[in-house]
Amino acid sequence: MSEQFDLIVVGSGAAGLSVALGTGGSLRIAVVSRGVSGLDGSTCWAQGGLAAAIGPGDSPGQHAADTINAGSRLNNKSAVRWLAESAPDIVRWLISLGMQFDSINGHLALGREAAHSFPRILHAGGDATGAELVRVLRETAARQPWIESYEFSDACEILKRGPQVVGVVVRNRRGELTRLLAPNVVLATGGIGQLYRYTSNPVEADGSGLALAHQAGAELAELEFVQFHPTAMAPTADNAVPQLPLVTEALRGAGAVLVNDLGVRFMLAASPQAELAPRDIVARAVWEQMANGRRVFLDTRSLADSVRQRFPNLVEACAQRGLDPRAHLVPVVPAAHYHMGGVKVDLHSMSRVPGLYAVGEVACTGVHGANRLASNSLLEALAFGKALGERLGKSGPAEPISRVDNAVGHAIRSESTNDQMVLGRLRQIMWSEVGIVRTPEGLQSALHQIQVLERRCLAGAPALRQLLVGRLVVEACLRRRESLGAHHIDVVAPHYGRSGQAVA
């Protein structure tokens, strides 16, 4: 079965819905999501906020400078400058859609997070910014008759006619395949956190968009730069949960500090910026404590009763474990959180494959460099997504597509128990050898193990997509021999061990 559209968007988070809404109604659009539209990706889980230089004394130029410094100056400076200058307009756009940002005395409240030189982070509901953003985008999209949602559908393959992209194949939850045809396809599929043993990402963030792009001939770039959030809530004895609750960085911005089980505030020795150092520095410091046999906690007790109003998600997650952040230390571990690498695109979100675009975390715009500045991810997804939608919307309705070159469906299989076992093994390999601190020997071992798993998988097995992305990440790590930003190479590093279990 085939359906004709003018534009197909794969992914329904901030990036994907911004593309769809940005077109302004001039195109018929299919939005493909693996679960409920808007609720099946990372956006709705975002506890941090949206960075915008709108406060006294701040400027887009300073926002850009902070972004470049955090990114170890590997950033695309033109992309950074454009993003920082776009931020105030994005805030105004969201407010016009009905987004309720936190305010104080009628003025937008601005918080400060790590490596920002000014308070410039807008939040909604304290630590529920992503949930409020998704609410606004979903409700707005639902009112547009030109946006058609394909929920509980997995994009299996990108269709091409010669070099030109002409659509995607999707599988619904009944296993039925449908060809969605359009001259332009936008990937907005999120990151790769689910390739790691500990992650703050939802189950949909498994790198599948990168695999689709690579198989279609797109270039992938800077895959070695994986950001680990320093503070996810540590797993309990049953540590098989696929997604750990995030303990937002805004807590440290508000005065919470990191201590080990001896009561030592170790970040004072790790960086002059202490808890507000860039994420890679904080994550490595936490990792080193754990590798040395220490447990790590976030001490939020100084925030007293304000923690309940400002950080309700934290309070709820703690309550589920019998903790009160006003009185107890919160146990934390680092977790795979954000991927700076992705499908290489230009300033117009175009890949090198005609008709294939990428926005949000799956894209590599060059904005983040070697390490993302906190709260720039929602901004990037919204700004690049909306701008791409506006450009594509000017193209007008497309001619029907009558031919594709791909042989579709013969090698696409449903997930099996074996796939789940393979992915479990991959997550352990990536965590222990391709994680916060890497070694040349560990990376070579990871490459060999992943190649063995690839050879053992049946053709068309869904796990092959994740194995492919894992291998490409390892190969990128091996090519970059020096430490830079989130990619840290250590010749004699302590590590978590082959089991993938954190030392606690």
Image: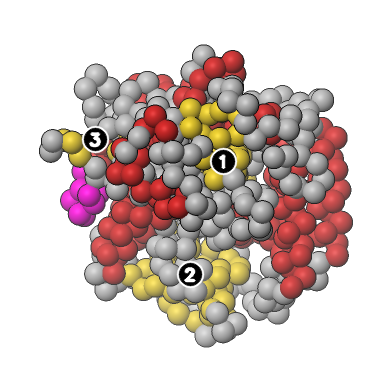
Counting from the top left corner in percent of width and height, residue 60 is at: 31, 26
Q: Secondary structure at mark 3?
A: loop
Numbered badge on residue 109: 3
Earlier-in-chain disc, 2 versus 1? 2
Circle 3: residue type: Ala
Label 2 environment density (alpha carbons within 10 Å; few <14, some 14–19, many ≥20): some
Circle 2: residue type: Gly
Numbered badge on residue 35: 2
Numbered badge on residue 171: none
Counting from the top left corner in percent of width and height, residue 40 is at: 47, 63
99 drawn magenta: yes
Look at 41% across and 21% down and name the residue there.
65
**Answer yes or no: do the residues labelled 2 and 3 have beta carbons within 8 Å?**
no
Asked whether, in this view, residue 370 is left or right of residue 253, the answer is right
Indicate whether 291 appears above or below 421: above
Label 3 environment density (alpha carbons within 10 Å; few <14, some 14–19, many ≥20): some
Distance from disc 2 to disc 3, alpha carbons, whole Å, reads 33 Å
- Nearer to us of marks 2 and 1 is 1
Distance from disc 2 to disc 1, alpha carbons, whole Å, reads 31 Å
Asked whether, in this view, residue 320 is left or right of residue 89, the answer is right
